[in-house]
Image (cartoon, helix red, strand yellow):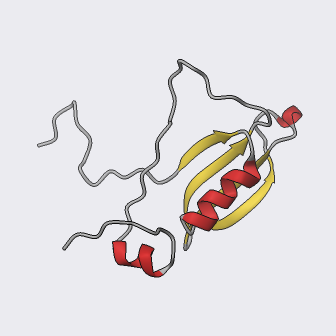
């Protein structure tokens, strides 16, 4: 029986959207270090007057991260929002073999 205060344990986050001040710098990190693939890039529909762009990255056909560029944006000192993203990968050895990290610890 599912209680009214819980969601099914199979629930997963399918993608996140992050605001960034410099899209090219963010893409260098997500593509270069993490190995995500650029699925699409174009003008941002959110705040079109800002001149920012949007980029969607992922793995295979799965979209994982949407980066919304807001040029000149600064991180608010006190605000709610998403400030951390964790990706679960099947094997730490892949990260080392792919040259993504120099000192990623592996466990048995």
Which quadrant of the figure has residue 32?
bottom right
Where does the image place residue 92, in percent across and percent down from the top left?
Answer: 35, 72
Measuring 36% from the left and 77% from the top, which residue is drawn there?
93
57 versus 94 height, above or below: above
Q: Is residue 10 left or right of residue 98?
A: left
Q: Quadrant of residue 56?
A: bottom right
The residue located at (67%, 52%) in the rendering is 26
Side (left or right) of 78 relative to 88: right
Tally of numbered tags? 0
Q: Where does the image place residue 89, in percent across and percent down from the top left?
A: 38, 67
Taking the view exactly as shown, the residue that stands out farthest to the top is 78
Quarter of the image with the C terminus in it? bottom left
As drawn, the residue found furthest toward the left would be 1
**In this view of the protein, which residue sits in the foreground, 100 or 81?**
100
Q: Residue at x 16, y 35 (%)?
A: 3
State the image coordinates of residue 96 (x, y, percent, origin top left): 43, 76
Is residue 4 rendered to the left or right of residue 88? left
Say which quadrant the N terminus sits in. Answer: top left
In the orientation shown, which residue stands out farthest toward the front? 103
Between 59 and 14, the residue placed more toward the observer is 59
Residue sitting nearer the eye, 59 or 92 = 92
Residue in the picture at 80% in, 37% down: 71
In the rendered view, tell whether residue 105 sits above or below residue 11.
below
The residue lying furthest to the bottom in this view is 97
């Amino acid at each position: 029986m599912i209680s009214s205060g819980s969601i099914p344990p199979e629930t997963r986050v399918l993608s996140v959207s992050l605001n960034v001040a410099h899209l090219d710098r963010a893409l260098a990190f997500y593509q270069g270090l993490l190995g995500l693939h650029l699925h699409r890039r174009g003008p941002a529909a959110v705040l079109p007057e800002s001149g920012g762009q949007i980029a969607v990255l992922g793995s295979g056909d799965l979209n994982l991260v949407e980066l919304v560029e807001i040029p000149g944006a600064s991180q608010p000192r006190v605000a709610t929002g998403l400030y951390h993203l964790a990706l679960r990968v099947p094997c730490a050895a892949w990260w080392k073999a792919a040259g993504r990290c120099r000192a990623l610890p592996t466990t048995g």
